[in-house]
Amino acid sequence: MITLKSVKYYKSLSEETLCFDANIYLDGKKIGSVSNRGTGGSSNYHLEKGYDMKFLENYLVEKYGDFFKEQSIYVDTFFDYQVLIKDAESEMKKLLKKTVFVDGGSILSVNAPFSEAVKGRLLQKRPNAVFFNDLPLNDAVELFNKNILGYANLEEAMKKIEVECKDFSQTNSLKM
């Protein structure tokens, strides 16, 4: 599986694209690095010998389907989504210092450490609340992503991209 490690995401420098630096790993072995300056251009890849962009494109096709065969831009998008997911995990770790919950599609927090007493008082006013603090970190991050980004994990993000791009292609082909 291809993943990113040592992700440094620079939100304040992100203009038209995400500004970040990260190392690319395949099944635990570092195969290169990727970065983007955040000014609208494609990401820059520095891959180890034996790995190239074609390898990354073929990986996406094998993992996510033939749709990605014609879409080399999705290598960038694939890594962008990983950066956002890593950032969400970092944000969730900070948020969990408070009491954080989702209710009616809104993420809310109380500036108090999580406890059963705080949870009990909140449940009296918000009986449908789901508390991030009660969940394992990975589940909390997925719930956070689902409510903030619209997808829970990388697999859902790739499916979302495919659907949106097929819709975009169909809409544009009708205009021609």
Image: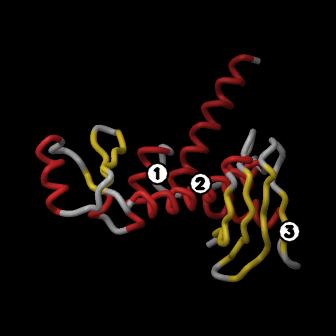
Quarter of the figure with residue 117: bottom left
User: What's under tag 2, amino acid-wise?
Assistant: Leu
Residue 84 badge: 2
Q: Earlier in the sequence, mark 3 or mark 2?
A: 3
User: What's under tag 1, amino acid-wise?
Assistant: Asn
- Residue 99, position as x, y percentages in the image: 30, 56
Q: Nearer the viewer, residue 101 or 157?
A: 101
Quarter of the figure with residue 104: top left
Residue named by callout 3: 46
Label 3–label 2 contact, CB within 8 A: no
- Which residue is situated farthest in the top direction here? 175
Residue at x-position 66% and y-position 49%:
11
Residue at x-position 65% and y-position 30%:
168
Q: Nearer the viewer, residue 43 or 97?
A: 97
Colouring of the image: secondary structure
Label 1–label 2 contact, CB within 8 A: yes
Per the model, the C-alpha gap separating discs 1 and 2 is: 9 Å
- Which residue is situated farthest in the bottom direction here? 29
Q: Secondary structure at mark 2?
A: helix
Quarter of the figure with residue 94: bottom left
Residue named by callout 1: 145
- Residue 2, position as x, y percentages in the image: 65, 70
User: What's under tag 3, amino acid-wise?
Assistant: His
Q: Nearer the viewer, residue 175 or 3?
A: 3
Quarter of the figure that contains the N terminus = bottom right
Q: Secondary structure at mark 3?
A: strand
Per the model, the C-alpha gap separating discs 1 and 3 is: 29 Å
